[in-house]
Image: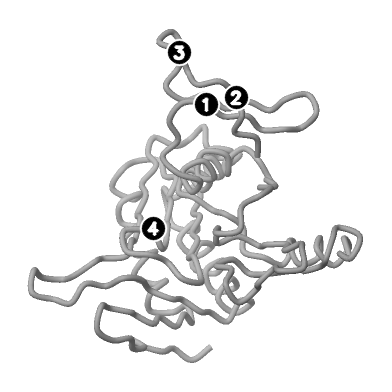
Amino acid sequence: ADHSAAPATADDPDTALSLSGDGVWQGRGVVDGFDDLLDGLAPDHDYLVAVGYDRLRLPTVLLGPDADAADTPGDVIATGANADDVDLDAVVDALDAAEPWITRETLVRRVEASPRAERSGAIATFTGRVRTRDSPDDNRTTHLAFEKYEGVARDRMDRIADELTDRDGVLDVAMHHRTGVIEAGEDIVFVVVLAGHRPEAFRAVEDGIDRLKDEVPIFKKETTEREEFWLHRRDP
């Protein structure tokens, strides 16, 4: 990432991002944060390499004699004194196995590309997020941590999506549940339904999130300002 571009002038957009001919991203103006940048790029790009960032919750390659994997928020997939010490094939394999950066817009674009989209008149979405507290007197939740049986969880979400898509009027369904540490106020889960009309779209979205919570083996640990605890477990 190259942040050396000149600041925006009065005639420029508030935020400008560009990719130079030699593959360097340049940015100027106001960017809310790196997560927002990733959210904007994710629907249209398969990969992004962020150079010089070590505080992101992303698959990370650490280089240098003082690299500290224990102090890195992302999953460290390789370390080395320099680039020559890194097995690139192993890095590629680790990236392919990593959870992709999925946003609600990613899933909306996915269902919009359905061959059945020309019959649709509605897209309904549900977004679950980390609630800070249930009431004003509750201890503040700082973050949640999610773990799942990866293969089983994906298979069950696919089965739920397929069964909802079999309903009359439902044309396509996409869903995604994030794992790892998710901070207060951040998004956790998305359900997106493409349908002919809004009634079947809304019903499928509600049933989709209810079934995901009931049927997909996901473990959730909550951390508040005072304690941390597992909320529930489901067998695979």
Q: At 45% across and 48% down in the image, what residue appears?
A: 104
Q: Is residue 194 left or right of residue 198?
A: right
> What amino acid is labelled 4 in the image?
Asp
Label 1 to label 4: alpha-carbon separation: 26 Å
Residue 47 visible in this rendered orientation of the protein:
no
Q: Give the percent coordinates (x, y) of residue 86.
A: 86, 64
- Residue 5 is left or right of residue 130, and the answer is right
Q: Quadrant of the N terminus?
A: top right
Q: Earlier in the sequence, mark 1 or mark 2?
A: 2
Q: Which residue is mark 3?
A: 9
Disc number for residue 28: 1
Q: Nearer the viewer, mark 4 or mark 3?
A: 3
- Whole-number angstrom distance, CA of label 4 to CA of label 2: 31 Å
For mark 2, what is the residue? 5
Do callouts 3 and 2 mark residues in contact (Cβ within 8 Å)?
no
Q: CB under 8 Å between callouts 4 and 2? A: no
Q: Which residue position is annotated with label 4? A: 187
Indicate the secondary structure of the residue bearing disc 3: loop
Circles 3 and 1, Cβ within 8 Å, touching? The answer is: no
